Image: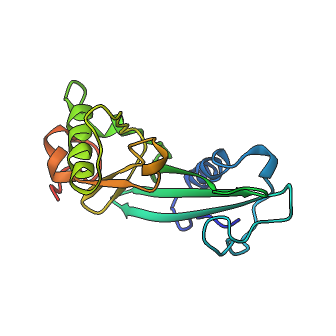
Amino acid sequence: MAYPEIAGLSSSETLASVNRLVDQAVLATIPESCQTTRDASSARKGEGCADLPDPGKTDVSVEYSVGLVNEGILSVRLHRTACTNPSLHPDDTVEGLTVNLATGTVYQVADLFRPGTPWQETLTQAVREKLSATTKVGTNVPISVHRFFLKEGALVVLRPVSARAFHSIDVEVPLKRVQPMLRADFPGSSDGK
């Protein structure tokens, strides 16, 4: 399994801490029965479960994309796919990890916003509007805005709808839409993009 390893930070303690956080974030997505030691081998190729492992075994791959690396922030999207033989469809999970590279602090979505602001309602409304424009999402479908990662100029809400039919949808919300609610001391909050 291959996943990101950070290099080049000035503090070796913070570097070790950030890499531990990435390791933990990846391992948290993988069933215990499939966890092995870190291996830089290439990820499984194929679509869905077309290339299943031997009967009774599970094949796991973790893909990642780095959304933002600036102003001391690293934000990563992790996508884990597990195929067990026999299986019709893969089991997949998406998580985000946003960490301060100077302190090793892991950010939750609420940490981005000033206390007392209606950030959750605003984000939920933005996600619902985007989903309504592209898919048929009723007003009674629950939206979750707690899994996220950051990319240049946007907060990406990861899998806001838990229904299987919407499993692959992530929704980008421009930072300018939530700019007035962002914490002033959060890196990147003043760029207004």
Name the foreground residue: 7 vs 171. 171
* Left or right, 127 with reference to 108: left
Describe residue 104's horizontal placement relative to residue 55 as left or right.
left
Residue 77: horizontal and vertical position, in percent?
A: 48, 57
Residue 139 x %, y %: 25, 35
Can the viewer see residue 11 in this picture?
A: no
Where residue 34 appears, x then y in whole percent? Answer: 78, 52
**Which residue extends farthest top?**
116
Is the N terminus in the top left, top right, bottom left or bottom right quadrant?
A: bottom right
Q: Nearer the viewer, residue 170 or 76?
A: 170
Query: Of residues 92 and 139, which is closer to you in this image?
Result: 139
Asked which colour scheme the image uses, the reply is rainbow
Q: Quadrant of residue 162?
A: top left
Residue displayed at 45% across by 64% down? 66
- Most distant residue in the right direction: 55
Q: Nearer the viewer, residue 80 or 40?
A: 80
**Can residue 167 be seen?**
yes
The residue lying at 38 percent from left, 44 percent from top is 160
Q: Kindly indicate the quadrant of the structure image that contains residue 108.
A: top left
Q: Please, is residue 102 above or below residue 5 in the view?
A: above
**Residue 41, horizontal then vertical, whole percent:** 73, 73
Q: How many marks?
A: 0
Apparent side of residue 37 relative to residue 153 in the rendered image (left or right): right
In the rendered image, the quadrant that contains the C terminus is bottom left
